Amino acid sequence: MQFRAIFAVGALAAALAAPGSVGAQTLNVVTAGDQNMVDYVNNYLGPKFEAMNPGVKVRAVGTGPGDAGSQKIYEKLSAQQKANVLAWDTDVAVVHQRGAATMVNEKLLMPYRNDVAAGKLVSRDTAKNALGANVDGYVLPMFHSQIAFAYNPDLVKNPPKSFAELTEWVKKNPKQFGYNGVKGGMSGVGFVMGWVNAYSTVGDKLEKGPYAASDRAAIDKSLVGLKDFNQYVVMTPGNAGTLDMLNRGEIAMGPVWVDMFYTWQAEGKLSPKVKLALPSPGLPGQPMYYVIPAKAANAALAKKFIDFAESPEVQADGIVKQFNWYPGIDPQFVQAKLTPADWNKLFTDISPADLAKNGRPFPLSDYFTDIVEGYERVVLK
Amino acid sequence: MTDAKTATASWRAYALVAPALAVIVAFFVLPLMLSAVLAFRARDGGFTFEHFAKAWDLYQTDLAFTIGIVLLSTVLIGVVAIAIAGYLTLGENPRAVAILRWLYRWPLFIPFIVTGQIMRTFLAKNGMLNHVLIGSGLIEPLSAQSLLDWRGIVVAFVWKQAPFVTLLVAGAMASLEPQHIEAARNLGARRLRVLFDIVLPQVRGTLLVGLVLSFVTMLSVLSVPMMINPNSPTMITVDVAYRISTLSDYAVANALCLMSLIVAATGAWFYLRHAASERSQA
């Protein structure tokens, strides 16, 4: 499998080294995440930035969904660092929290927040802290995404307000709740994290630390309940699989990414009747970060690009209105740039107050590993 | 030929295969050895079985599941391939033979990931298959169930790989001496009898090779189990992808890869044994 990783990095390098950089400046943006991330840069952000900066060409490459996508970017930057390359061919990268934490730790990134005007517009804790790692100054959140329960109101009149209510609900309505385990995408992983947060005695420590390996026992204990819970639910094939099954009426409720949910509804792939709910004590969400590699060839241009991407106008029109993500900068700057209808669309089912109360970060990296491995050991075996 | 001439000739032969050999060593043998080394290397650089212990502890069910699914699929592929190739060789209705010949190859040109995608909507609880069965009154709506578990994977594998084996077997059957079949038919043997007693024994080798190649191919498919049933129990490939993408744990992933390599090697052993016996006969 090492070979595949090397191959992927090689393919990436080949894609980036393609001709086109002579004369005009080319800004290379490498983004982890689904195809919609690449589309966002190529179809929306890039053309606007190119129009404002004649002679500049923005080129985006995607490295694939989930932490694996960030891992590929990390492997590429790390290889260039070890080879003592002077100018790295990635100018802007978009990565997940775990990736950002590793990259800051290994000095692969450049601090830039104080160099861009938009750096003052961010307010959430995630701009400083990525799963317990200090990333202050190195990152700006591009957007925030959140996991929530999607449910069919024809079948579920009163969606469960907490994990305890959910546990009761699935016993009364067996095989009506579906999620995608830990191997089929992050919405299922997020649900398991939410479960452990709700039912284990370690609670807040998962997010704030300090990490202790001895907490594994408490985590495993809470997962025993999940094994029982799983007898009453359906396992779905992936993030999209949960939405598919909801749409075909095969399940009545399941955890999904909020932005994916809204995008599917806007594209007519999901019934407009399906609604969202965020139970207490909460489900995790995460930002994607804009970062600049430590030796980016076009660092000045990269800063300009990120400053533009974080401006309230772009955050309002691109992030919120077109792609249905929660903004990366403080919402108050974004709300002013949107019509009340567009703003409210994002908060129809989940109010800003609920989001603030029940929108949680993912657990610290070590706890994260303990929980997914505990799931394999306790729930799956 | 003199000795000097032989030496030049063999030197030339080596030079000719060198580029191909270099590619195999650099891109196949070397990564394979790296993978094996990493599977046994502890965090401090020493030798360890820890990764294998963890892989066995967490994934022994998946390993058994993988072997079971792939074996079952191989058997079914054999049955389907014999049925189709047999009809192509012994069928008496030329139009039916022509249609079948035209139809059966289609899945050959469809990638595994597309097969997975097709099956995902086709076999779902409220998917097309159940809609057809309910619409034709064959099953009650309430008894409709999702086939997106091990059965879905088997269906996808057989659908995709049977044409490949059929292609090989039908080719071998077509190259048989037609007199054998005609003689048996003249003596009053029925077609099924001809298939099992005259045709099949002669193409047994080709059938075995096709099945072994399918077995090894299916063992390494990630897309189909990922799309149809990535949850427990699932196939080893999904676990390998998961160890790397979610936990960036190459060590356990490499251990899992070596385990599936051993399973694939038993297939290769069959293949080599057959190839050796062919050579000794020739």
Image (cartoon, rainbow, N blue to C red):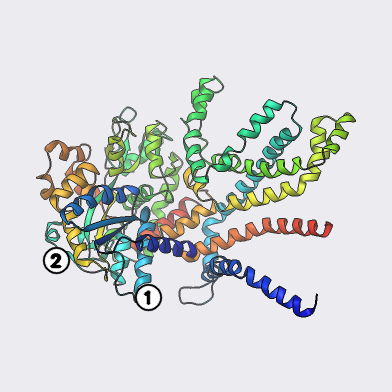
Alpha carbon of mark 1 to alpha carbon of mark 2: how far? Answer: 29 Å
Q: How many C-alpha atoms fall within 10 Å of the one at disc 1: few (<14), some, or many (≥20)?
A: few
Residue farthest to the bottom, as pictured: B4
Which mark, by number, is residue A114? 2
The amino acid at mark 2 is: Asn
Residue farthest to the top, as pictured: B137
Which mark, by number, is residue A83? 1
* Left or right: residue A210 compared with residue A116: right
Question: Quadrant of residue B26 in the image?
Answer: bottom right
Whether residue B231 is visible, yes or no, is no
Q: Position of residue B37 (x, y in %)?
A: 54, 71
Q: Position of residue B172 (x, y in %)?
A: 74, 44
Q: Of A230 and B219, which appears nearest the observer?
A: B219
Q: Position of residue A296 (x, y in %)?
A: 26, 68
Q: Position of residue B125 (x, y in %)?
A: 48, 32
Whether residue A104 is visible, yes or no, is yes
| Disc 1 secondary structure class | loop
* Left or right: residue A59 compared with residue A54: right
> Which quadrant does the N terminus of chain B fall into?
bottom right
The amino acid at mark 1 is: Ala
Chain under label 1? Answer: A
Chain under label 2? Answer: A
Residue at x 34% of width, y 28% of height: A155
Residue at x 54% of width, y 24% of height: B133
| Disc 2 secondary structure class | helix
Question: Quadrant of residue B81 in the image?
Answer: top right
Residue at x 30% of width, y 75% of height: A86
Task: State whether residue A332 is above or below residue A251.
Answer: below
Q: Earlier in the sequence, mark 1 or mark 2?
A: 1
Q: Of A214 and A80, which appears nearest the observer?
A: A80
Q: Of A170 and B280, which appears nearest the observer?
A: B280
